[in-house]
Amino acid sequence: MNVIKTGLSLLLMAVIPPSFAAEKTKLPAQATAKVNAQFEVKLPSNPTTGYNWIVRQLPEQVALTGMDYAQSPDCKAGMVGCGGTTTLRFKALKAGTGKLIVQYARPWEALTNEAATINIHVAE
């Protein structure tokens, strides 16, 4: 019986995409920086599911300088499948306002229209 439950759980995890509807409150609505400053945008994630944050649109006011993942400090040693935070690093290039559009998706699957928009404001 446990084998059936485990198999069904794995099947559902593979078929049903994770919804960040509950997490949307954790997604930043905006980020601000001054020209030539470095800044970060942090997004909740769990790459053990195969899902990663994909930058769909980058505003002309910034350059993406890096992206990394850090497991949650709440994840105890030896645990697997724990979530964490993906950090996008940017450099502000010129003053103005633009939209950073990101999507939580599996890179090998077709992209959907479910994307998050973060307003980026760069000041002089």
Image: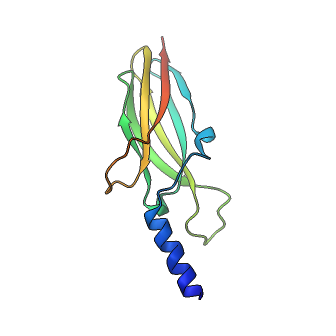
Give the quadrant of residue 31: top right
Q: How is the image coloured?
A: rainbow
Give the quadrant of residue 97: top left
Q: Nearer the viewer, residue 29 or 32?
A: 29
Relative to 51, residue 58 above or below: above
Relative to 115, residue 100 above or below: above
Q: Nearer the viewer, residue 69 or 25?
A: 25
Where is residue 56? Give x, y as percent: 36, 37
Residue in the picture at 37% in, 46% down: 112
Residue in the picture at 57% in, 80% down: 5
Q: Nearer the viewer, residue 119 or 61?
A: 119
Dividing the image into 4 quarters, which one contains the N terminus? bottom right
Q: Nearer the viewer, residue 92 or 107?
A: 107
Where is residue 38? Give x, y as percent: 48, 28
Relative to 64, residue 96 above or below: above
Where is residue 24? Give x, y as percent: 58, 41
Where is residue 43? Give x, y as percent: 54, 43
